[in-house]
Image (cartoon, grey):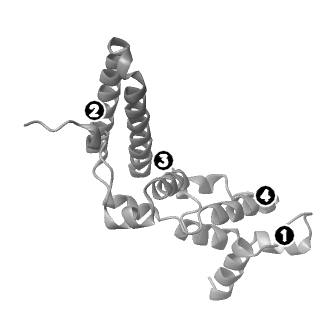
Amino acid sequence: MALSDFVLAAILIFSNSELSEPNLALQQEANLAPFVQAIAWHLEILDPRESQYVLFRSEDFSTDLQLLKKRAEELFGVPLVNDAIRFPDRTVIQEMLSFNRAYKHHLNARANLEPLFGADLHAVIKETDQLYQVWDYIRDAKCEYYYVTVRRHALKKVLESLGTEAFYSGNYPPSVPTWRFAPID
């Protein structure tokens, strides 16, 4: 394995050029498939389990390379899978999501029993659903049997939902809108 092969593989992934018709040069580039795979694993744009069908056949090299280029573009600047370690364990997240659904059920029951407060309760239900979505993305990011690309897309959604500062400083929202809870004296 020569360093030049890795450099060429990286150039193939990050170049803006489109690969079109198969030709001799493309056939020679297909020989770089193991190097492209290695770089794609490192960049977390290809899960090792996908190697049995992505960049496996030389005749699919162009199509597979376009897939990796698209993923590299979509996931540029997105946290790597290891960043999911900052979140609680999946069992804790699941408990939080279960509490969120129970709270929503309670709010729906109240909205049916107290129609005068319907508009306010529906606003709280909407906030509860938004918090559920954030924690559902976090659960997906923590799910180790998902492909790395799925987990990174989930991290992207978390980052977009929370904002960069909150994501990296550990300021995560509660599982339900606790700011709506009435204080007990």
Reading the image, the residue beneath label 2 is: 99
Q: Is residue 129 left or right of residue 5?
A: left
Tell me whether circle 2 and circle 3 mark residues in contact (CB < 8 Å): no
Q: Is residue 8 left or right of residue 174?
A: right
CA distance separating discs 4 and 1: 13 Å
Q: How many marks?
A: 4
CA distance separating discs 4 and 3: 23 Å
Q: Nearer the viewer, residue 103 or 123?
A: 123
Q: Amino acid at mark 4?
A: Thr
Q: Nearer the viewer, residue 39 or 143?
A: 143
Residue 170 position within the rendered picture, expressed as x and y whole percent measured from the top left: 31, 62
Between label 2 and label 3, give the one nearer the viewer: 2
Reading the image, the residue beneath label 3 is: 146
Which label's residue is closer to the chain start, 2 or 1?
Answer: 1
Q: Amino acid at mark 3?
A: Tyr
Reading the image, the residue beneath label 4 is: 63
Q: Is residue 55 left or right of residue 45?
A: right
Q: Say if 60 sits above or below 41 in the image.
A: above
Q: Amino acid at mark 1?
A: Gln
Q: Residues within 10 Å of mark 3 (few under 14, many from 20)?
A: few
Which label's residue is closer to the chain start, 1 or 3?
Answer: 1
